[in-house]
Amino acid sequence: MTYILLTGGAGYIGSHTALALLRAGYQVISFDNYSNSSTTALQRVAQLANSNIITLSGDIRDEAALSAVFRQYQISAVVHFAGLKAVGESTEMPLHYYDNNVAGTVTLCRVMREFKVKKLVFSSSATVYGDAKTVPIDETAPRSATNPYGQSKLMIEHILEDLVKAEPDWGITLLRYFNPVGADSSGQIGEDPNGIPNNLMPFISQVAVGKRDKLSIFGDDYPTPDGTGVRDYIHVVDLAAGHLKALQYLESQQGIEAINLGTGTGYSVLDMVKAFSSVNKVAVPYQIAPRRPGDIASCYARPDKALKLLGWQAEKTLEDMVRDSWRWQRQNPNGYGNSN
Ligand code: NAD
Ligand code: WQD
């Protein structure tokens, strides 16, 4: 029996991908230190899939612990979600971010090589495009980073590119996610940020459920149709399906490819607020606030490469995104901490 190893499998995107993989008949192991997640997510994944998932607690920087996993289980490929992702926090704790994300990935690759497992899907990000000169953004756009989080993703991309140059028998896919939102349609698993959410969709949901007074819209004077920032929001269930396609693609491929996972459509902050209110019939009070430092005006993908190489494209609509985000929030007002 062979397994797919998910590092960070208990997290937001990892748990949705675990569910998609189990439903597709894969055997799945999650290896997570639970620094930003809960074991409940994977218990629910197993229930939803009516199947077992091996859940291991450990840190990707712990080489001995990782080696023990590879020794015990026959692993055919790794999907590497484990990482810290809060942009603001990364500027305050750069060493922690570089250690966790960059050093952790180097350790993971060393162990993979030792056990001759050379298929890797890596969670990269549209953040590697920095402030792109033109939209839509394709994979050949220049890369840059404006904060340690983004820098860590960029460094990892470079490290993996160098690894493939030196050892061409690796097969690596860098999946550059745009803005993941939404939740499984069961409302059982979803995004559960710690403290005050940094990202738009969980903030909107928490306002709607009454946990926060109002949303601050960061700037209404951007050069966009309504002045608020434009992003490529992608449903997490579509994203999960993209990982499945990437794993299938790697079965017959070597080398390294960077692939955007986005819808190709940009929506503004106001579009998101209005869609959330009207689809869910719930009020989302907001105020216009100053721009958030480091934010860009507009960012959305050219998703053609994913269709061409993986046969993948996003299928969920904006309505699906806001409806599913709300169902998760309403059913779990306190996330996994204290669910209804
Ligand atoms: P998440 O925080 O929900 O999941 C990450 C998981 O990794 C968590 O369960 C956490 O406990 C675990 N983890 C962190 N460091 C670890 C370590 N050293 N050892 C073991 N486990 C560790 O985040 P997510 O939204 O699911 O993101 C998954 C990946 O996708 C991350 O690498 C993130 O940078 C990337 N990404 C996320 C977004 C987004 O907006 N959510 C966008 C682009 C890229
Ligand atoms: C979206 C839009 C904000 C919150 C970040 C990371 C990126 C990637 C995805 C990991 C922007 C506006 C937000 C709020 C608002 N993560 N906004 N009020 O900044 O596009 O990307 O998450 O790789 O690296 O930088 O996402 O959800 O924070 O913001 O007005 O309270 O919503 O200004 O226009 P962002 P976001």
Image: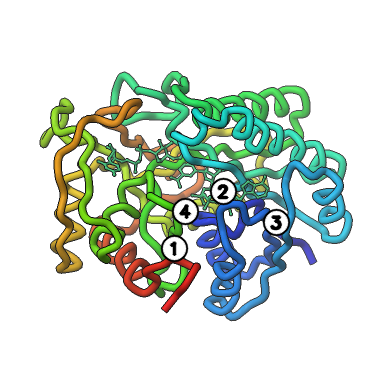
Q: Earlier in the sequence, mark 4 or mark 2?
A: 4
- The residue at which mark 4 appears reads as 194
Answer whether labels 4 and 2 touch (C-beta < 8 Å): no
Q: In this view, does 112 lie to the left or right of 122?
A: right
Give the residue number, with chain letter if any, for mark 1.
190
| Circle 2 residues within 10 Å: few <14, some 14–19, many ≥20 | many
Q: Quadrant of residue 5?
A: bottom right
Q: Tell me the amino acid under the disc marked 2.
A: Ala
> What residue do we see at 16% from left, 49% from top?
286
Dot in front, 3 or 4: 4
Label 1 secondary element: loop
Residue 107 lies, with reference to residue 152, above or below; the image says: below
**Ligand 1 under 8 Å from disc 3 Cβ:** yes
Instruction: Return the residue nearer the eye: 80 or 249.
Output: 80
Helix, strand or loop at label 2? It is helix
Amino acid bearing label 1: Gly
Can you tell which quarter of the image residue 340 is in?
bottom left
Residue sitting nearer the eye, 315 or 323: 323
Q: Position of residue 166 (x, y in %)?
A: 76, 23
**CA neighbours of label 1 inside 10 A, class few (<14), some (14 to 19), many (20+):** many
Distance (Cα) linking label 1 and label 2? 22 Å
Identity of the amino acid at label 3? Answer: Phe
Closer to the chain start, of discs 3 and 2, is 3
Q: How far apart are marks 3 and 2 (CA)?
A: 20 Å
Return the x and y of residue 322 as percentages of the image width and height: 27, 60
Write down the residue under mark 3. Answer: 31
> SS of the residue at dot 3?
strand
Q: Is residue 316 visible?
A: yes
Q: Which of marks 4 and 2 is in front?
A: 4
| Quarter of the image that includes the N terminus | bottom right
Sequence-wise first label, 3 or 1? 3
